[in-house]
Image (cartoon, rainbow, N blue to C red):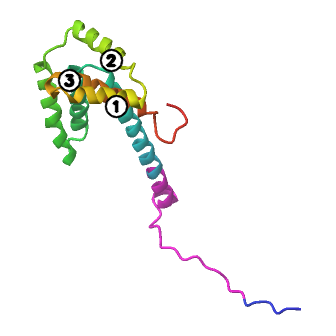
Amino acid sequence: MRRRAHRRARVAWSRSVGPAYRYGTPGLARLRRHRRLRRWVRTGALLTAIGLVRLARAVRPRWRLLAAGSVLTAAGLMLRDGAWSMILLPGLLLLLSAPLIPASPDADHERRSELESELAVYATAAQQRDLAAILDRYPDSVTGELRDILADQAIAGSHHGIPGAGWS
């Protein structure tokens, strides 16, 4: 028979959480509740930001400034006590500068959507390289809109929703 090893009583040392709060509730439970709430707020803010980015892609340039200005203004008004109140001024400036952007008529919007559908034909990498080589022969002032559409299509083609999620 083997000799049994000497066992000591194990004690987990931890620092004190603090005094018990009113009605005997410990501070640890209160801290966990705040962490959970903070995590939910951060998750909600992240999902809201993702939704606003997708919304900003879909709307026209004038409405993008209005959306950004209204979000910054609302956040600046809600958080006006701290340093975050400084975002109120850029929000107001965006709201005031939105009417200065000329409105694009529906004919321009239809022309751009038609051009986007025509450029969507260049689907393979080889076709896109050939088109880029053709566009490089001309100045950017002439081909700027085409390059913007191609860049938007490249971003939209590579975007698959939220990273790590199984859905898009």
Majority secondary structure in the magenta region? loop
Callout 3 secondary element: helix
**Front position in the image: 53 or 81:** 53
The residue that label 1 is drawn on is 129
The residue that label 3 is drawn on is 143
Quick check: 112 left or right of 123? Answer: left
Are there few (<14), some (14-19), or many (20+) residues within 10 Å of tag 3?
few
**Front position in the image: 135 or 111:** 135
Q: Quadrant of the N terminus?
A: bottom right
Q: Which residue lies at the image location 18% right of the left edge and 33% below the top edge? A: 91
Q: Position of residue 125 (x, y in %)?
A: 40, 31
Estimate the spatial distance between the alpha carbons at disc 1 and disc 3, rounded to whole Å. 15 Å
Q: Nearer the viewer, mark 1 or mark 3?
A: 1
Q: Nearer the viewer, mark 2 or mark 3?
A: 3
**Front position in the image: 16 or 142:** 142
Estimate the spatial distance between the alpha carbons at disc 2 and disc 3, rounded to whole Å. 14 Å
* Pointer 1 or 2: first along the chain: 2
Q: Amino acid at mark 3?
A: Thr
Quick check: 146 left or right of 118? Answer: left
* Pointer 1 or 3: first along the chain: 1
User: Can residue 61 be seen in this snapshot?
Assistant: yes
Q: Is residue 24 magenta?
A: yes
Residue 166: which disc?
none
Q: Position of residue 74 (x, y in %)?
A: 24, 32
Q: Amino acid at mark 1?
A: Arg
Estimate the spatial distance between the alpha carbons at disc 1 and disc 2, rounded to whole Å. 17 Å
Q: Which residues are magenta?
A: 7-34
Classify residue 6 by image quadrant.
Answer: bottom right
Note whether 30 is above or below 53 in the view shown.
Answer: below
Q: How many marks?
A: 3
Residue 116: which disc?
2
* Pointer 2 or 3: first along the chain: 2
